[in-house]
Image (cartoon, rainbow, N blue to C red):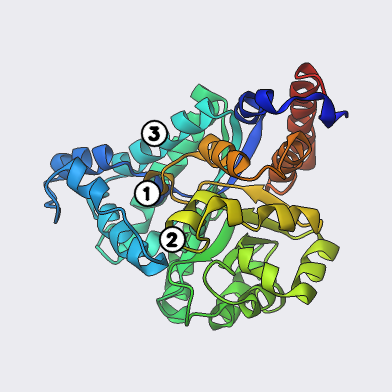
Amino acid sequence: MNFDAIPADRLPALLQRMPKAELHIHIEGSLEPELIFALAERNGVTLALDSVEALRAAYAFTDLQSFLDIYYAGASVLLTEQDFHDMAMAYFRRAAADHVVHAELFFDPQTHTERGVPFETVVRGLKRACEDAERELGVSALLILCFLRHLSEEAAFETLAQALPHRDAIAGIGLDSSERGHPPEKFARVFARCRELGFRLVAHAGEEGPPAYVWSALDTLHVERIDHGVRSIDDPALMARLARDGVPLTVCPLSNLKLCVVSSLSEHPLPALLAAGLRATINSDDPAYFGGYLNRNFTETFAALPQLGAAEAYRLARNSLEASFVAPERQAAWVAALDRCFAEAGA
Ligand code: ADE
Ligand code: ZN
């Protein structure tokens, strides 16, 4: 393909139009303030702030923990199966508009079971939304259950036991929440059990935590993808390992900006990760909180980083499709659609 044939002014439209997968989206992080207030009213939940505007104004984060405190408070309005369904459908409609052909949704059951919401309420609502998304919007979807790393491994084992009656609805297991002080090896035994059970494995590592956490996620948890992983840039041996093994990284540029992992998008390590041959992808993380869904992550990142052009756009979209947990034949059909999209654009 001749990527140089695509002029820079045609790139934003191409970024938006190209078929892509989203592999790092916390579905609770897609709750827009308007929906938080609508669900609070529907369920009779009282919120600490009294308007959509006041809530949005509180979205000024200094680090991951300052965000998580607000994010968990927002999730407190989710009580019924229909709530989880409606939240996910709102995300899927936006994803479809962004030409997302496949999404892998993280969900945090412990955030809900700790409040007395049964595990099955959460998973049934999300599962029904995944089915509706495929049928009504043509968006394929999988669910990834995340353990909260600020809680104990014992609590993760209890959550796994609750998940087993719903084994078929859950494609994979992940690890999220407060990273610093909670290294991957804290969850070595529960991840080993999940591996025996045949779950696909991922973990957040190297977002705020050090490169050592990425090594540990790979060598102790045996994950297939690293969520974030941007701090790997500080460890040349780790960069070589990630490149050699083709480990996908689910990078989230607007999240990194909002949580002060980078001081500006123009300093984001994404171009260096790609140049080193790493299988990076672009994702939105918690789009309702970080100022943009997937296409906005693409367009703002490319606008800030002139090193990124049509070749990198193609590589990122292709990585996202090929790093997904769907069968190779389905991936190949999406890659063929991506190739047609670039050919039509003149590449
Ligand atoms: N939960 C939701 N978003 C997260 C993030 N960016 N890092 C860790 N845990 C999260
Ligand atoms: Zn995340």
Disc 1 crowd, CA 10 A, few/some/many (<14, 14-19, 20+) = many
Residue at 18% over, 47% down:
54
Q: Is residue 248 left or right of residue 16?
A: right
Sequence-earlier tag: 2 or 3: 3
Question: Which amino acid is tagged 2?
Answer: Leu
Quarter of the view holding residue 219: bottom right
**Residue 229 in view:** no
Q: Is mark 2 within 8 Å of ligand 1?
A: yes
Marks 1,3: beta carbons within 8 A:
no
Q: Nearer the viewer, residue 342 or 88?
A: 342
* Residue 174 position (above or below residue 190): above
Mark 2: which secondary structure? loop
Q: Which residue is mark 3?
A: 90
Label 3: how many residues lie within 10 Å, few (<14), some (14-19) or many (20+)?
some
Q: Is residue 209 left or right of residue 30?
A: right
Amino acid on which disc 3 is placed: Ala
Q: Residue furthest right?
A: 1
Q: CA distance from mark 1 to mark 3?
A: 15 Å
Q: Which residue is mark 2?
A: 259
77 versus 235 height, above or below: above
Could you give the CA–CA distance between mark 2 and mark 1, rounded to whole angstroms? 10 Å
Q: Nearer the viewer, residue 214 or 169?
A: 214
SS at mark 1? helix
Find residue 289 and name its label: 1
Side of 260 relative to 269 (left or right): left
Q: What amino acid is at disc 1? A: Tyr
